[in-house]
Amino acid sequence: MITKQEYEQVREEALTFLKQTGVVLRQDEIDAFEVADFGLGRIREIGLQLVVYVNTERHCAKELVLLPRQTCPEHLHPPVGDSPGKEETFRCRFGTVYLNVPGEMTEHPKAKIPTGRDEHYTVWNEIVLNPGDQYTIPPNTPHWFQAGEEGAVVTEFSTQSTDEFDLFTAPDIKRVPEVQT
Amino acid sequence: MITKQEYEQVREEALTFLKQTGVVLRQDEIDAFEVADFGLGRIREIGLQLVVYVNTERHCAKELVLLPRQTCPEHLHPPVGDSPGKEETFRCRFGTVYLNVPGEMTEHPKAKIPTGRDEHYTVWNEIVLNPGDQYTIPPNTPHWFQAGEEGAVVTEFSTQSTDEFDLFTAPDIKRVPEVQT
Ligand SMILES: [Zn+2]
Ligand SMILES: [Zn+2]
């Protein structure tokens, strides 16, 4: 659960990051700009802010914003129908992103797991993305990411997005936000 | 044919537009940044500058730069193998883009055809894109576009790009640039 006030404040902060990065949104995109707290009520630690530019059956693009040290929790995009699952490229525009994917465990990772949630993070190969850096995540591959101290803006280029099929490692995660009214 | 000097000058101008728009490129992307004169030797009128961020079998993204009034000539992306053809979304980041697609002829279009090349432009439904505006072009659909007086920066989100299969309306167009050495 997230209070209306907290939701609006996080939203404004994230929109300010976009503005500072030089990303121009239309008014209808600003109105639709989304805060996802994944149902955990710990928005500043575990959450994601985003706008969807386009999402057709064949291609998709979004702008993602992370507050300082905010984490998008571990998930994967499974096969759906004829599709092998969503393939996505993260391109960092502002700040630093610590992206974790399967592979050799990074010895001194920069990302820090939100307190009490270690068991819900299983991949530990940390890729550091600074502005201009990008990484493509194959379908059906677990990943999670955290912003550095400055926060981050990340453009996502991908195949079709079907959020409702995303699988989160933590069983208590809800993708659709619950805002206190 | 384009001289080496002209190529380099256009390249620098286009990279300056990107910088002013806040687009951060890595050094390897700057090195690979491309000037396409379509083999016509009229680069400031008919041409396109671009960098490919990612191009997999399933998704693609590019940054396109147009000099003031520069035109990307009419072309379409035909079906290739199992694919119905490239589907692309143009999102304007800077300047104004006059995008032309099939449909009702726009009465007072803002785009102006490069001298002597009217016959190579057949679609006249003009869509005006300012920063934040975007438009999705279905596969196998002719389109062309021109920047306004300021030039333009456009992000392209799409399915796989296979430039070698693109069909240009003008028979004298060559997609691969010929630079005088
Ligand atoms: Zn993902
Ligand atoms: Zn095209």
Image (spheres, coloured by chain):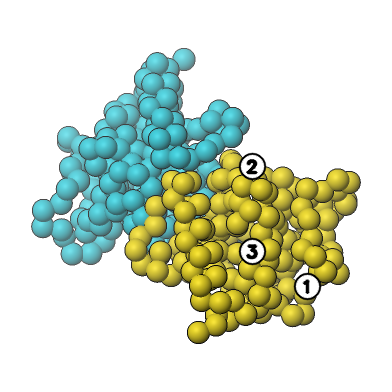
Chain colours: A yellow, B cyan
Q: Name the residue nearer the viewer: A100 or B50.
A: A100
Kindly identify the residue that appears in the image at 46 percent across and 15 percent down: B181
Which residue is label 3 attached to?
A: A44
**Callout 2: CB less than 8 Å from ligand 1:** no
| SS category of the residue bearing label 2 | loop
Kindly identify the residue that appears in the image at 80 percent across and 65 percent down: A115
Distance between the alpha carbons at the discs numbered 3 and 1: 19 Å
Chain letter of mark 1 equals: A
Label 2 crowd (10 A; few <14 / some 14-19 / many >=20): many
Chain letter of mark 3 equals: A
Q: Give percent across and percent down for residue B97.
A: 29, 48
Kindly identify the residue that appears in the image at 49 percent across and 69 percent down: A8
Going from N to C along the chain, the mark reached first, 3 or 2, is: 3
Label 1 crowd (10 A; few <14 / some 14-19 / many >=20): some
Going from N to C along the chain, the mark reached first, 3 or 1, is: 3
| Vertical position of residue B12 compared to residue B65: above or below | above
Q: Give percent across and percent down for residue B52.
A: 53, 43
What amino acid type should be assigned to the residue bearing mark 3?
A: Arg
Q: Residue furthest bottom?
A: A181
Q: Give percent across and percent down for residue B63.
A: 46, 44
| Vertical position of residue A38 compared to residue B101: above or below | below
What amino acid type should be assigned to the residue bearing mark 2?
A: Asn
Kindly identify the residue that appears in the image at 86 percent across and 45 percent down: A108
Distance between the alpha carbons at the discs numbered 1 and 2: 26 Å
Q: Name the residue nearer the viewer: A155 or B78.
A: A155
Marking on residue A130: 2
Q: Residue furthest left?
A: B107
Residue B46 placement, left or right of B155:
left
Disc tally is 3
